[in-house]
Image (spheres, rainbow, N blue to C red):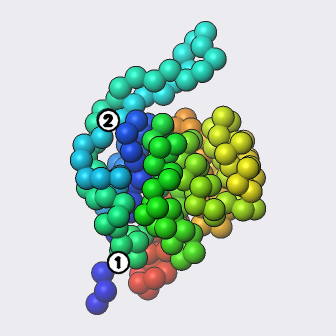
Amino acid sequence: MTQPLNKVLIIIGDATETVDTLYPYYRLIEAGFQPVVAAPERRRYQMVLHEVKPGWTITKEWEGYSIEAEIAFKDIVPAEYAGIFFSGGRAPEYIREDEALLRMTRWFWENERPMASVCHGVEIPARAGIVQGLRMATVAKCKFDLEICGGIYVNEPCVIDRHMVSGRTYHDSGHFVGPWIRMLEAARAAAFGMKF
C-alpha cells in the first residue's frame, strides 16, 4: 500500500524570520507531518527576528536561532511532498530568482497541493507568476509586490483562496497555520482513502 504523503516543505534562506519559520515547523510535527526545511543549498542558515520597535517606523532586525536546511531547491522532487510553506523575513527577496524554487512553486500551484505564505513569503508565489486574481494576506509593505503581479491584497489574519492560505505576519500564525494544516490533513485523507 502507498504511504500517505507526510513530508511538507518549509522554504527559507538567509535571514528568514524565526517565528515565521518555527511556528509552522512545530505545528506540522504536532499534526503528524514531517517538516522538511529547504533552501538554496544544504547548510545551516541564520534566522532573524523582525519587529517594529516603539518609536521606529521601519522594521528592526537582529539575529534569532539558526536552522539546518535538509535539502537544496534543485534536489527537490515536488511530488514527494504534501504541501509547501513560504516563510517570511528578508530571505524571499533574495531567493525569489532561484529557477528551481520558481518551478517547484508553479508545480504545487498547478497540482493543487496545499500552499501557505506569511509576510514577505508572498514574494515567491508572486515572482512565480501564480497570484493573478488570487486573494492573499501579506505584510502591508509587500502589498505592491503582490498587486503588481496581479494578486489582490487582503488585510486580514487569514486568507484562504483555493489551495493557498496566507497571513500578514507572525502575529497571525495562530489564525492561518491551523487552517493550512487542516487542508493538508484533508488532502492526505482524500488521496489515501483515510478517515478524517
Residue visible at 35% across and 52% down? 39
Direction from residue 161 to residue 106 in the image, left or right = left
Q: Is residue 101 visible?
A: yes
- Left-right relation of 155 to 195: right
Residue 54, percent across and down?
Answer: 58, 12
Nearer to us in this view, 26 or 13: 13
154, above or below 46, in the image: below
Residue drawn at the location 55% of the way across and 23% of the way down: 59
Q: Position of residue 49 (x, y in %)?
A: 43, 28
161 and 91: which is toward the camera: 91
Q: Residues within 10 Å of mark 2 (few under 14, many from 20)?
A: some
Quadrant for the N terminus, please. Answer: bottom left
- Do we see residue 178 in this rendering? no
SS for callout 2: strand
Give me the disc on residue 46.
2
Name the amino acid type tagged 2. Gln
Q: Earlier in the sequence, mark 2 or mark 1?
A: 1
For residue 44, what is the image quadrant? top left
- Residue for badge 1: 4
Percent across and percent down for residue 181 are: 48, 60
Q: Please give left or right for residue 160 compared with residue 44 in the image.
A: right
Mark carried by residue 57: none
Q: Are dots 2 and 1 in contact, CB under 8 Å?
A: no
